[in-house]
Amino acid sequence: MERKSKVKDSNLIVYLLFVLIALIWGLSFVGIKYTLDDYTPLELLAVRWGISGLVFIILAALKIIKVNFKGKPNGLLLMLCAFQPGIYSIFEAAGVNFTTSS
């Protein structure tokens, strides 16, 4: 019986974390919209991805996360990085710039 209780508690935590993630993700669009009142989409992305890159480099340097590119298809990885966060973010910021937030 105790096992079922732990599973239910675990499921509740997972569901609450998903709600939190959705809330943060949804509010990021409002934050982007307000930020675009003062900055261009490319300026916003430069700061956003610059901070992300800096945090990633610090975490890798402190060995909090392990990064190993040996034997990996680095060309494909570079292309993936260009398309997914790169082009996607540019179009997202430009799209948010041309819409209203309500």
Image (cartoon, grey):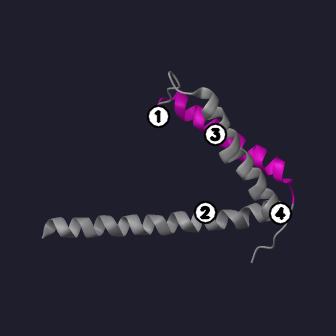
Could you tell me which secondary element the residue under label 2 belongs to? helix
**Residue assigned mark 3:** 80
* First in residue order: circle 2 vs circle 3: 2
Rounded to the nearest whole Å, what is the CA distance between mark 1 and mark 3?
24 Å
- Label 3 sits on what residue type? Leu
Q: Main secondary structure of the magenta part?
A: helix
Q: Check the image and report above or below for 54 versus 14.
A: above
**Residue assigned mark 1:** 64
Residue 16, image quadrant: bottom left
Residue 62 is situated, as x and y percent measured from the top left of the image, at 50, 29
What span is in magenta?
38-65
- Label 4 sits on what residue type? Asn
Q: Nearer the viewer, mark 1 or mark 2?
A: 2
Residue 2 is situated, as x and y percent measured from the top left of the image, at 14, 67
Where the N terminus falls, by quadrant? bottom left
The residue shown at (57%, 68%) is: 23
* First in residue order: circle 1 vs circle 3: 1
Horizontally, residue 16 falls left or right of residue 9, namely: right
Could you tell me which secondary element the residue under label 4 belongs to? helix
Q: Residues within 10 Å of mark 1 (few under 14, many from 20)?
A: few
- Label 1 sits on what residue type? Ile
**Residue assigned mark 4:** 97
Rounded to the nearest whole Å, what is the CA distance between mark 4 and mark 2?
17 Å
Q: Residues within 10 Å of mark 4 (few under 14, many from 20)?
A: some
* First in residue order: circle 4 vs circle 3: 3
Rounded to the nearest whole Å, what is the CA distance between mark 2 and mark 3?
22 Å
**Residue assigned mark 2:** 25
